[in-house]
Amino acid sequence: MAMEQAESIRCFLIPISDHNLLLPAAVVAEVAGFQEADPVPDCLAEQEWLFGFANWRNQKIPLISMEAVITGERADPSAHARIVVLKGIGGRLQLPYFAVLTQHVPRPTILFEPAVESLDEFEPIPGIHGQVLVNGEPALLPDLEEIESQLHTILFE
């Protein structure tokens, strides 16, 4: 009798201050060492979640603080901070990449459907789709489409 093969998805658990983000590996372009970001112009200073602009492969890409997306307050980068460069998923030519500040090195993981459990008691947060348990560990599912759309609006419209 042949065993059914479970569907698997390569992902990253990305540590931010009090949470982990769960992202499919397909949207991650690179995990880079932390560098001081170029500051945002004064006209964007009220966008607390826009941390600045990172230099990546001879490009300046927006760097966001998911802590500020979730709580409205940025977290200072830790000594182990990294920048996770994400591929734009909205097809916007002006925004092919953006980055998320992470407090520690992201952990690759392979998800199998039985290992992921949705948490129904999740309180909605702007920029977050929901929360799941991954092998018993809670993780937030960021709404990359919404975040990218907000970035495009404040930077290019």
Image (cartoon, grey):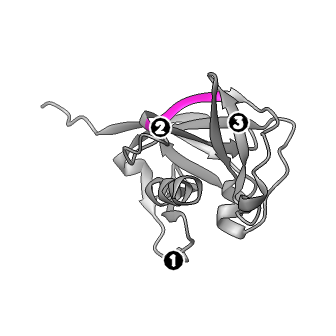
The magenta segment is 27-31
Report whether residue 11 is seen.
no
Residues 60 and 13: in front is 60
Q: Residues within 10 Å of mark 1 (few under 14, many from 20)?
A: few
Q: In which quarter of the image is the N terminus?
A: top left
Q: Quadrant of residue 26?
A: top left
Residues 4 and 47: in front is 47
Image coordinates of residue 91 in percent, x first then y, are: 36, 44
Secondary structure beneath dot 3 equals strand
Q: Do the residues labelled 2 and 3 touch (CB within 8 Å)?
A: no
> Given this view, does label 2 or label 1 mark the residue nearer the observer?
2
Left or right of 66 in this view: 8: left
Q: Are marks 2 and 1 in contact (CB under 8 Å)?
A: no
Which residue bears the numbered disc 3?
54
Compared to 67, does 107 lie above or below? above
As for residue 153 lying within the magenta part, the answer is no
Secondary structure beneath dot 1 equals loop
**Nearest to N terminus: mark 1 or mark 3:** 3
The secondary structure making up most of the magenta span is: strand
Report whether residue 93 is seen.
yes
Q: What residue type is labelled 3?
A: Ala
As for residue 30 lying within the magenta part, the answer is yes
**Nearest to N terminus: mark 2 or mark 1:** 2
Q: Which amino acid does label 1 sit on?
A: Glu
| Residue at the (78%, 40%) spot, across then down | 38
Which residue bears the numbered disc 2?
96
